[in-house]
Image (tube, rainbow, N blue to C red):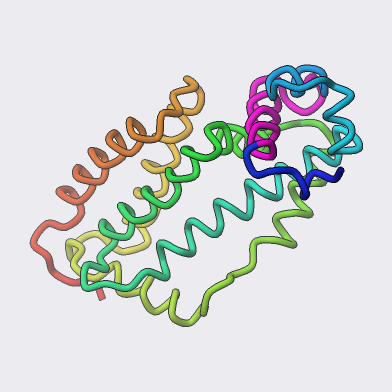
Amino acid sequence: MTFEKLEKEKQNKIINAACEIFAKHGYKKASMKDIAEAAGISKSVLFKYVSNKENLYMKIFRLASDSIIEADEISYAEEGSDSDMFSLMRRNAKTRLSLFKEYPWIYKFAYTAAFDNDCFVKEHVRRELENYRKPRFNTSEIKSEHNNVYKGLRADIPPTIAKQLILWVSQGYLEEKLFKDEIDPDELEKGFEAWIDILEILLKGNNKSCD
């Protein structure tokens, strides 16, 4: 039986086990035996579903990449009257962190994959990012909304600076939590909401546009 024909629950057990083991040990040191044990199955059964470690890693990385991109694009595509950058950040956090509930180790895996020194991983990451980071929604609509979210910033803070600050805070917060293996989605969202509130106070100011 192929992996794709497995029941969703069994697929998720293998996916989560692979994400955890690859995230903790890196590609080279992770073993199919450890992944099978984490998934609650034997190594021989695991090999019935996936032919080798390389194919399993590629499958997991593609899932992680696609899922994260889709979550981001959904948050951009959602329409509403509250389309400032802080509302967008809150929507983005909710859609991204919802992945944790299904795949608790998916972000830690994606993060460690980006810094894995194994030649196979480096080449695969490069190739997958080229092939799969393509918009699935109307890009003109996304760009239009993205431009509008920067309205309302303090006049003395250019949007480019605000964007960089938001990126540093967002990445830094998530990286610190992942490094400590703090992956509870509710706690992550609560903590990130607090940082969004602080950024909103700092960047909104007198509500004048930066156009």
Residue at image location 70% in from the left, 30% down from the top? 18
Q: In which quadrant of the rendered view does residue 207 lie? A: bottom left
Q: Position of residue 154 (x, y in %)?
A: 17, 61
Where residue 24 appears, as percent x and y from the top left, is 65, 21
Residue drawn 25% across the image and 65% down it: 84
Between 16 and 159, the residue placed more toward the observer is 16
Q: Report the magenta residues as a range.
A: 10-30
Q: Where is residue 151 drawn, in percent x and y?
A: 23, 70
**Is-magenta flag for residue 192?**
no
Q: Is residue 207 left or right of residue 110?
A: left
Q: Quadrant of the N terminus?
A: top right
Which quadrant of the figure contains the C terminus? bottom left
In percent of the image, x 36 and y 34: which residue is there?
Answer: 188
| Residue at figure coordinates x 36%, y 41% from the top left | 169
Q: Is residue 47 above or below residue 8?
A: above
Q: Is residue 21 magenta?
A: yes
> Could you tell me what secondary structure mostly forms the magenta stretch?
helix
- Quadrant of res 75: bottom left
Q: Give above or below for 142 relative to 56.
A: below
